[in-house]
Amino acid sequence: MKIQDQVGHADWGLYSGLFSFGFLFIAFSDMGVNQFLTKSLASDRRSVDRFFPPLLSFKLLIGVVYPFVLVVLGWFLGYDRHQLYFLFLLCIVHAGNQLMAYFRAGFQAMQMFAIDGVLSIFERVVLLLLVAGLFFAGMNITGFIYMRVVTALLCGAAFYFLYTYVFGRVVPRWDYAEIKTALKMSFPFAIMTILYSVHDKVDQVMLERIAGAKENGLYAGAYRWLDAFSMYLWTVLPIFFARFAHYLRDHQAQEKLLHFGQVIAAIPMTFVSIFVFFYGEKLLFLFGESTPDEISTMTACLHGLFVAVWFNGVFAIFSTLLTATGHEKFVNRLAVVSIAINIVLNSIFIPRYGAVASAWTTVVSYIFLDLAYVVYIQFRIPVRIPWFQMAKLMLAGGVTAGVFFLGENFSIGWLLTSVGGGLALAGFSFLTGLLSREKIRSFTI
């Protein structure tokens, strides 16, 4: 937020649009290899020596090619020379992040979730430390992009050395036969990566191209918080992805994981979504240079986006189950339909409502996906949907929202109200059995 406040909404909107455009095609720097590796190694650890070295050489190769491919695509979209230079640098960042995810996939597959959890935030910490220096040297969007490139390269190297320290030396090895086999098996994951990348980032690309960089900057100011809180899900759900893959033929174990994983994912997302609905403007505390109208637009975007966050918190575990157990094609088809809905709605409403339109089209697309997951699992997979548990989660959200409503109407203050809402949510969860000491202990172990 402070960086955006310093460089301005327009510059940040351009950066965000270019970053999102690179993200749309991030599959070019991955090709589904990361998820394939997690699933394969989790179910058969003997395949480490077979796949890891040749796929590492392939990852390095496509990581070099990917930025050049995106520059060509950006040129067709109408970006000028200066913007294409920024796009090239940001694609280096994406390629570095995908390389880091490749090494994390090895730790996830080996069930080393403590190490993976640390690595999931390591890159952010390094970036924060490097960017802190820019506030003293002079903050601008060019310097920030350079710091992102340096962070991606440093952390990619650090992850490699940590992996070799834990598992032994890994030397990239070109083996066309093994790479071809792996790519054929990872193709569904590559399609999934493309679809989910488009689903998550097409809003910002369309906003920047249709409504302008400043409007996209306002949306990005709100969307940042969706990304920040979703990092919890991005940390937790890969653990369940690896465990679902580990129990590939044990439907009873999958069902137990599904029920437990939904609670672990949903409860924190329920609290933050309700907080944002009542006190979303509190998250924009560093935008000291923004006008009241700009703050109002970002707050309105937050309200819509965190409805999507709540749905994702409750239902994302279903998608994780499907992708880990061989139902990638169905998930991909759903994503295509959801993207079409998103693009059509954005095309209609962005010219009239700007950033706020993108927030609510995101909600519509998430609702479609989440309900479709539930229907498919209910009728096609021998794993029971936790209907009663979902009812308790919704009731827990209602109790929490009630506390926030009373706190706001009796002017208790946002901090005390938030503490009360959190205690109410935790207390209700323990009283109804959604949470217990045994469940928490089993997850942390």
Image (cartoon, helix red, strand yellow):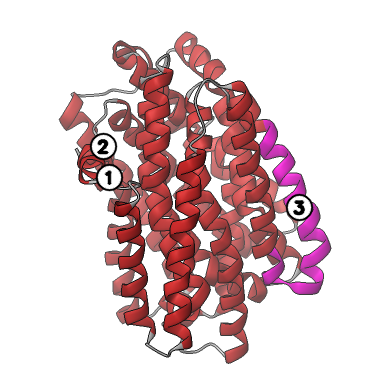
**Visible in this render: residue 32?**
no
Is residue 441 left or right of 179 when viewed as pictured?
A: left
Q: Are marks 1 and 3 in contact (CB under 8 Å)?
A: no
Q: CA distance from mark 1 to mark 3?
A: 34 Å
Badge 1 density bin: few <14, some 14–19, many ≥20, Cα 10 Å = some
Is residue 372 left or right of 113 when viewed as pictured?
A: right
In depth, the one of 280 and 14 nearer the eye is 280
Amino acid type of disc 3? Ile
Q: CA distance from mark 3 to mark 2?
A: 36 Å
- Assess whether residue 348 is covered by the magenta stretch: yes
Residue 372 spot, x, y in % from top left:
65, 37
In depth, the one of 327 and 294 nearer the eye is 327
Question: In this rendering, is residue 272 above or below 263?
Answer: below
Q: Are marks 2 and 1 in contact (CB under 8 Å)?
A: yes
| Secondary-structure class at tag 3 | helix
Name the residue located 32 percent from the left edge and 81 percent from the top edge.
416
- Say the numbered circle drawn on residue 343: 3
**Visible in this render: residue 49?**
yes
Q: Quadrant of residue 355?
A: bottom right
Residue 231 spot, x, y in % from top left:
40, 53
Name the residue located 69 percent from the left edge and 54 percent from the top edge.
364
**Residue at image mark 2:** 113
Q: CA distance from mark 2 to mark 1?
A: 6 Å
| First of labels 1, 3 by sequence position | 1
Q: Quadrant of residue 174?
A: top left
Start-end of magenta stretch: 333-358
- Assess whether residue 192 is covered by the magenta stretch: no
**Residue at image mark 1:** 117
